[in-house]
Image: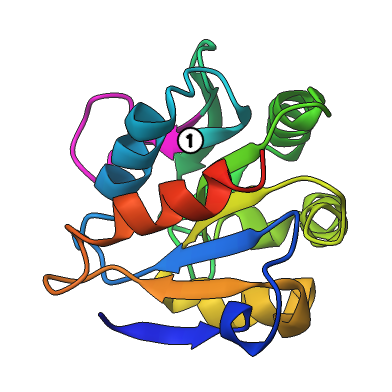
């Protein structure tokens, strides 16, 4: 098992775990999240997933979809954008992302947070607050954006920081489900 950091072993398990999952592109982060959701029987937690709308990674549009919701375009490819070839539609992103977090009685699953989402300070602030709230959180963070997200959220707010790779992909769904089951 390849854990980057875990604060859970340093004392009693917190009632509202905040789990971050990271790993290389294609490591299976979303696959682990899907397995956790199946194991827990969660079909519509609060939160969202981002995806390419059934197209190849790097397609023209990036979608945000609340669990059980309808995909919404939040970013479009823009090769003139400095540093990253997508331009975020801030209004659409804020509207759909914030709405997905509103069911306050539900645990939160975010698949995924990356470079694009960091462009929206209001949203990053809301996620940092979520990591301090009385709700369990499972968040996938792109490896290339991990340090920036940890800086904004605060490393102390994360109870487990786990890496998905070939050695951990099979183990992590059961481990994460057990941690979240104990908190809900």
**Is residue 46 left or right of 163 when viewed as pictured?**
right
Q: Is residue 14 a member of the stretch shown in magenta?
A: no
- Tell me the residue at 76%/82% (across/down): 156
Seen from the viewer's position, the closer of residues 90 and 160 is 160
Quadrant housing the N terminus: bottom left
Above or below: residue 96 compared with residue 82: above
Residue density around tag 1, few if under 14, some if 14–19, many if 20 or more, within 10 Å: many
Above or below: residue 172 compared with residue 184: below
Above or below: residue 44 compared with residue 92: above
Above or below: residue 27 compared with residue 104: below
- Provide the residue designation for mark 1: 49
Q: Please provide the residue range marked out in magenta.
A: 50-64
Q: Position of residue 3 (x, y in %)?
A: 38, 82
Please tell me in which quadrant of the rendered image residue 95 appears. top right
- Tell me the residue at 29%/83% (across/down): 2
Q: How is the image coloured?
A: rainbow
- Tell me the residue at 32%/71% (across/down): 23
**Is residue 97 left or right of 74 when viewed as pictured?**
right
**Residue farthest toward the front in the current orientation of the protein:** 12
Q: Position of residue 121 (x, y in %)?
A: 82, 59
Q: Position of residue 5 (x, y in %)?
A: 51, 87
Q: Position of residue 151 (x, y in %)?
A: 72, 83
- Tell me the residue at 51%/10% (across/down): 70
Dot 1: element: strand
């Amino acid at each position: 098992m390849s854990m980057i950091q875990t604060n859970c072993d340093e004392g009693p398990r917190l009632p509202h775990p905040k789990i971050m999952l990271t790993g290389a592109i294609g490591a299976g982060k979303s696959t682990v999240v899907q397995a956790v959701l199946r194991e827990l029987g969660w079909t519509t937690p609060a939160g969202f997933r981002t995806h390419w709308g059934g197209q190849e990674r790097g397609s023209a549009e990036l979608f945000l979809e609340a669990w059980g919701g309808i995909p919404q375009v939040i970013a479009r490819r823009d090769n003139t954008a400095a540093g990253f070839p997508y331009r975020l539609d801030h209004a659409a992103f804020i509207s759909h992302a914030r709405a997905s977090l509103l069911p306050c009685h539900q645990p939160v699953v975010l698949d995924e947070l990356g470079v694009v989402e960091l462009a929206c300070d209001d949203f990053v602030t809301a996620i940092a607050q979520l990591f301090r709230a009385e709700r369990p959180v499972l968040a996938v963070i792109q490896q290339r954006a991990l340090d920036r997200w940890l800086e904004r959220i605060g490393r102390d707010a994360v109870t487990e920081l786990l890496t998905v790779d070939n050695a951990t992909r099979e183990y992590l769904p059961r481990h994460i489900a057990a941690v979240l089951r104990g908190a809900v």
